[in-house]
Image: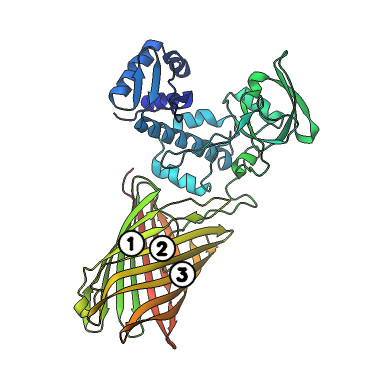
Amino acid sequence: MIASPTVENYLKAIYLGGAGAAPPRRLMPMGQLASALGVAPGTATTMVKTLAESGLVEYEPYAGVTLTKAGKRLAALVLRRHRLVELFLVRVMGYSWDEVHEEAEHLEHVVSDRLIDRIDEMLGRPEADPHGDPIPNSDGLVKAQDAQTLLSCPLHTPVTVTRVIDQDKSFLRFIEGHHLKPGESIEVEHRDPASDSVRVRGKNDERITIGTRAASKLLVQVARVVVLLAALAGAASAQDATAPGTPAPFAITDNSMLVEEAFNQDRGVVQNIFQVGVSEQHEWVTAFTQEWPLFGHRNQISYTLTYESLGDASGFTDTQLHYRFQIRDESAHGPAIAPRVSVFLPTGDSARALGEGHPSWQMNLPISKQFGDFYVHWNAGFTHSPAAEVEGREWNLLAISGGTSVIWRMRPMLHLMFESVALSDEEVDNGSTVRTPSVVMSPAVRGGWNIGDAQLVLGLGVPITRGGGESSAALITYFSYELPFKK
């Protein structure tokens, strides 16, 4: 079934009605669904049966409807688009938080996943929209919220408003006018069941009495350490993405030359990387890497093909296959982390020194974090060759590496870089293994251009290697072309 706006609206309504919640499964009554969508019960039932035939919902006559796993994911992605659009309209376009819901209702059906992923990246991968509603990630997963309403939170205890569960404009204006927006610190002083009222003390010791219905729509957290994203605190002032104290996102992020970044490809985007290195002895190596997202941003697969010209031998060397998992995305509270595992297939001619002649594998842990106009990437890893053939016998060899890359943004798309890598190779010498340490330091520069939905990046580096009491220099050129492979 094509995910039309009508289908998406039904899935979203069922999700928000509770059918998307974790077990025990909750069925949404058909009358409630029809009311939420403003249609007749018979119309809702007919559509739900069609959705059930498509495997998006499970329908039980006279009981209700719930989402299947596929339906839940589609519904979550619709909410992701809706809530990121709301936050973009508030933070970048200057809308107030009480007028973005209707705009997002229209835009959620027409914006592409490509655009949404770019908005998500530009806003710093936020976890909540201007109303505090959680934003699903690119895989449709939502971070659990530990919150209470004003009807159940402790009395006389400072709490932080985290979410407003109502999109009515007049209600949102009321909340804003009495300083009850997400991010505000308040206390519940008294609850009166007889009058269905709750008295709250808020900003500047202002006291306000609200009804229990309104109190049930305000979610709070007790822990003081819970801090909402800057989007929540800045919704009233409609600050832009480069407001003071908020680092502007880098326009170029995943284009280092020696030290790997912890950023997987966005959904629907492929990156092509071509590098050429030339040594002082006029020997050269070229490498082509292509990176693809696998079922979304969380998983990435890639491969590397290498061609070398060393002395009298020229040709392709061993083929590399890579898988990287995004453990966490970068946020204001922590770095991006994306470990990678690679397999080296002995496809080169080892007799001509074009390959190792045996399979090996590699683990690497990239960590990335922005600090204002600087980006820092850290790497640590190893390469294991369990059956290396040296001097007529097999050896179990392990090479260890670690690296750091510091990138300074001179201009939005012009960066100076300094990369350094420390290596400790295990080699065989006269029937025993020895370790050979070396250090590579490389000053570099990179620049880029956005061409429609694509991005072109060029780079130039001068890696200097020091090891075994000797130093050598080389020149490395970098070319990247990143573009969407689907709309």
Horizontal side, residue 316 vs residue 472: left or right: left
Depicted 99 relative to depicted 32: above or below: below
In the rendered structure, which amino acid carries the disc numbered 1? Ser
Secondary structure category for the residue under label 3: strand
Q: Residues within 10 Å of mark 1 (few under 14, many from 20)?
A: some
Q: CA distance from mark 1 to mark 2?
A: 9 Å
Residue 68: image tag: none
Residue 208: image location, x then y, percent: 75, 25
In depth, the one of 73 and 145 nearer the eye is 145
Depicted 472 relative to depicted 163: above or below: below
Residue 27: image location, x then y, percent: 42, 20
- Residue picked out by circle 3: 402
In depth, the one of 369 and 473 nearer the eye is 369
Q: Earlier in the sequence, mark 2 or mark 3?
A: 2
In the rendered structure, which amino acid carries the disc numbered 3? Gly
Q: CA distance from mark 3 to mark 1?
A: 16 Å
Residue 183: image location, x then y, percent: 66, 38
Q: Residues within 10 Å of mark 3 (few under 14, many from 20)?
A: some
Which residue does the image show at 69% across and 16% down from the upper left? Answer: 196
Residue 62, by quadrant, is top left
Residue 236: image location, x then y, percent: 65, 37
- Residue picked out by circle 1: 342
Q: Residues within 10 Å of mark 2 (few under 14, many from 20)?
A: many
Residue 364: image tag: 2
